Amino acid sequence: MGFPIFSKFFSFSSNQHSDKTISPIITLIEEYAKTKEYFFFRDMTIYHRSKSIKVPLMLFIQKIGIVLFSIKEWDYKDLENATLKRTSYLDDNENTLAFDNIQRFISEKLLDIAQIEDIHFVNFAILPRIAFKEYTLLDNSIKTLLPEEKILFEDTTLEDIDKKLSLLTSEKQYDPNKIIPFIYSEYMIIDQNNIALANEEQRAFIDTQLHSIKNISAKRISGKTHTLILKALKEKLYNPEKKITIIAPTKLHIYILRQLLLQLLEKSCIILDMAEFSFFTPEELIEFHAKKINKELMTYKKVDPILLKKEIFIAELILCDDANLFDREFITYLKKQQQKYSLCFINEQELTPTYIFTQTYLENKVEFHPNNSSSYLFTTLYNLLENDINASILIFTEIDEEKSLAEDIKNYTGITTNFIEQDNIQNIDKSQIQIAPLKSSIPLRAEYVFILTTDDTNLEDLTYLLNASKKTTFVLYNEENKTIKDFQKDLNGKSDKN
């Protein structure tokens, strides 16, 4: 829909205009999109396998589909003197108006990675150097090729835009979560096999230009780690020469971040070498720095003062996940290293937030049980598995209890468990029941999570471990101490207490 003839005809010579006048109209379209809560995309590139195409301006409207805008700086004289002739190719240069390339590219990508083949397109032309009154004076042959209802003029108003778009409809409603992430892969949030569109807060961060030092304050289950990976992907796609480094507290964190990036590349069908990104734990980065300056250190767990004196180039952009788990001296070291480049933390506790993720996707139920006995745990496990034989389960316990607990679970349920150590990625497997340290920063998730608390368990531990559950978290304790009460208060009393 749009310009049925334009993809085949309409070419002429025109003078090139250096005076750009399109900004007011684009601002008007953006304002209109905000009032209607439509999705607005400007000067973005779509990537598919090894190819890409730039899209100057696009709207996504659920009741219409995809609205594409071709921006042309033709003036009245250009159109008055236009010579009509058949175009043998369908590009989108200054002197032709063809949407076919962009439509075809989007359609092929949606079909390839999402099996969507019925997306509806509408095409508009933006003519910022022609007023509506001038348009009425044009020859009818030009007007046939440039129908008024599909043009935004120099003097177009919000009311005009609304009127023209309101006339358009599609036979179906389009879900943005099932369309946009498959077009713009930098907005693709992947959770297991589910794909969703990054929310407005996440997209704002992904699209921003990062300079100097920035900090994201993010709530639990806010999609912060996924957003960090999406930001890394967009920076690399739009700036292929840029060196990007991602830092996380543990090797297991790094493993999971790598897997997220790999999964994103596979799902979005983008050909990009994983070696284009570097990943480090704090210890690994310190060791890397020491080797660069030919310095052997007794330990890589702490920042040696000599590293602060001899700076090296690490990357134009460093992205840090869970910075609240870094040592303060390591954060100071990073800030000094990146003085000339960009650095972004997630939850750096002493740095004023530049971005705040207020949305949370935590929908799991929390149950508090004043019974931390093995018999209660085994009974609950048995009931869970009886109702959901394929349920994934994660148990957090004291580090010296995991072996005996694993043996008891196998004897009781017949299931072999797997113990996950903080820095041993070899321990990750697909066991149905996983056991991890109680004081853990392991970013794993399961449908059901058991937290076997002790008197030493603090509020920070409980809050972090709550992130691991997709359905239900069982907090087992012997006595209702201050930590348990504070945790219940923090959940706003929404937990089911037994």
Image (cartoon, rainbow, N blue to C red):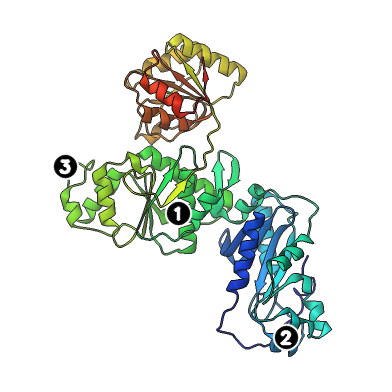
Give left or right: position of 134 versus 221: right
The dot on residue 374 is none
- Residue 207 visible in the shown view: yes
Residue contact between numbered discs 1 and 2, judged by CB atoms under 8 Å:
no
Q: Residue furthest top?
A: 375
Instruction: Name the spot of residue 162 as percent of width and height, x first.
Output: 72, 63
Q: Nearer the viewer, mark 3 or mark 2?
A: 2
Residue 462 found in image quarter: top left
Residue contact between numbered discs 3 and 2, judged by CB atoms under 8 Å:
no
User: Callout 3, which amino acid?
Assistant: Met
Q: Earlier in the sequence, mark 3 or mark 2?
A: 2
User: Callout 2, which amino acid?
Assistant: Leu
Residue 19 found in image quarter: bottom right
The dot on residue 298 is 3
User: Which element type, helix, strand or loop, lies under badge 1?
Assistant: helix
For the residues marked 3 and 1, what is the alpha-carbon distance in whole angstroms?
33 Å
Q: Alpha-carbon neighbours of circle 1 within 10 Å: few (<14), some, or many (≥20)?
A: many
Give left or right: position of 393 versus 72: left
Mark 1 lies on residue: 232
User: Which element type, helix, strand or loop, lies under badge 3?
Assistant: loop
Mark 2 lies on residue: 79
User: Which element type, helix, strand or loop, lies under badge 2?
Assistant: helix
* Residue in the picture at 69% in, 87% down: 78
Image quadrant for the N terminus?
Answer: bottom right
Instruction: Name the spot of residue 84 as percent of width and height, x first.
Output: 77, 85
For the residues marked 3 and 2, what is the alpha-carbon distance in whole angstroms?
75 Å
Q: Alpha-carbon neighbours of circle 3 within 10 Å: few (<14), some, or many (≥20)?
A: few
Q: Earlier in the sequence, mark 1 or mark 2?
A: 2
User: Callout 1, which amino acid?
Assistant: Ala
Residue contact between numbered discs 3 and 1, judged by CB atoms under 8 Å:
no
